[in-house]
C-alpha cells in the first residue's frame, strides 16, 4: 500500500470517528404547554390561555399567553395536586381546593402576598 493511500484512509476513518462524537443536531428544548382555566366553587370553567414551561441553564422559564383577565398584577404558584376541582372546606365549597397546598417541598418561607387568580389543570 502506498503511503498516500494509508494517509487518505487514516484521514477518512478519523473524520468518521470525530463526526460520530460531534453533535450536529439541534438540541430540542424540553417544553411543556399547560392549559389554564378559570375556576369557581361551581367547578372548572373555560380556558383563559396557556403557560409554557421550559428548562434553561438559569432554571425554569415560565411564559404566559393569557386572555380575558382584568387589568392588574398577577402572581404564579404551583399546587401539590393536579386537580382544580372544587372541594369542601369548613362546610363550604371552595374554588380549586382539590389542588391542595402550594407546592413547596423545601418549606421555603413565603415572602409575598398570596392571592390566587388562576389555577393550572395539569396532571402531575
Image (cartoon, rainbow, N blue to C red):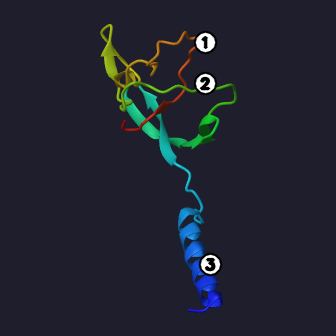
In the foreground, 88 or 32: 32
Whether the residues at callouts 2 and 1 have beta carbons within 8 Å, the answer is: yes
Q: Secondary structure at mark 3?
A: helix
Distance in Å between CA atoms under marks 2 and 1: 9 Å
**Image quadrant of residue 9?**
bottom right
| Residue 10 horizontal side relative to residue 119, left or right | right
| Disc 2 crowd, CA 10 A, few/some/many (<14, 14-19, 20+) | few
| Disc 1 crowd, CA 10 A, few/some/many (<14, 14-19, 20+) | few
- The picture places residue 43, in percent across and down from the top left corner, at 37, 31
- Which of the marked residues, 1 or 3, is nearer the chain's N terminus? 3
- Which of the marked residues, 2 or 1, is nearer the chain's N terminus? 2
Tell me if residue 34 can be seen.
yes
Tell me if residue 67 can be seen.
no
In the foreground, 104 or 39: 104
**Image quadrant of residue 41?**
top left
Whether the residues at callouts 3 and 2 have beta carbons within 8 Å, the answer is: no
Q: Residue at x 63, y 26 (%)?
A: 74
Q: Is residue 25 above or below residue 56?
A: below
Q: Residue at x 63, y 85 (%)?
A: 8
| Disc 3 crowd, CA 10 A, few/some/many (<14, 14-19, 20+) | few
Distance in Å between CA atoms under marks 3 and 2: 59 Å
Q: Circle 1 is placed at which residue position?
A: 113
- The picture places residue 90, in percent across and down from the top left corner, at 33, 7
Give the mark toward the camera: 1 or 3.
3
| Residue 88 horizontal side relative to residue 41, left or right | left
Count of marks, rendered view? 3
Q: Residue at x 59, y 85 (%)?
A: 6
- The picture places residue 79, in percent across and down from the top left corner, at 43, 25
Residue sticking out furthest to the right: 72
Give me the disc on residue 11.
3
Q: Circle 2 is placed at which residue position?
A: 75
Amino acid at each position: 500500500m502506498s503511503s498516500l493511500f494509508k494517509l487518505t484512509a487514516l484521514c477518512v476513518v478519523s473524520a468518521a470517528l470525530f463526526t460520530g462524537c460531534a453533535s450536529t443536531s439541534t438540541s430540542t428544548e424540553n417544553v411543556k404547554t399547560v392549559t389554564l382555566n378559570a375556576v369557581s366553587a361551581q367547578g372548572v370553567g373555560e380556558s383563559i390561555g396557556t403557560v409554557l414551561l421550559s428548562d434553561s441553564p438559569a432554571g425554569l422559564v415560565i411564559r404566559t399567553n393569557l386572555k380575558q383577565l382584568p387589568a392588574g398584577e398577577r402572581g404564579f404558584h404551583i399546587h401539590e395536586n393536579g386537580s382544580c376541582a372544587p372541594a369542601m372546606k369548613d362546610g363550604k365549597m371552595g374554588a380549586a381546593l382539590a389542588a391542595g397546598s402550594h407546592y413547596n417541598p423545601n418549606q421555603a418561607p413565603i415572602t409575598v402576598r398570596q392571592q390566587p387568580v388562576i389555577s393550572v389543570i395539569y396532571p402531575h
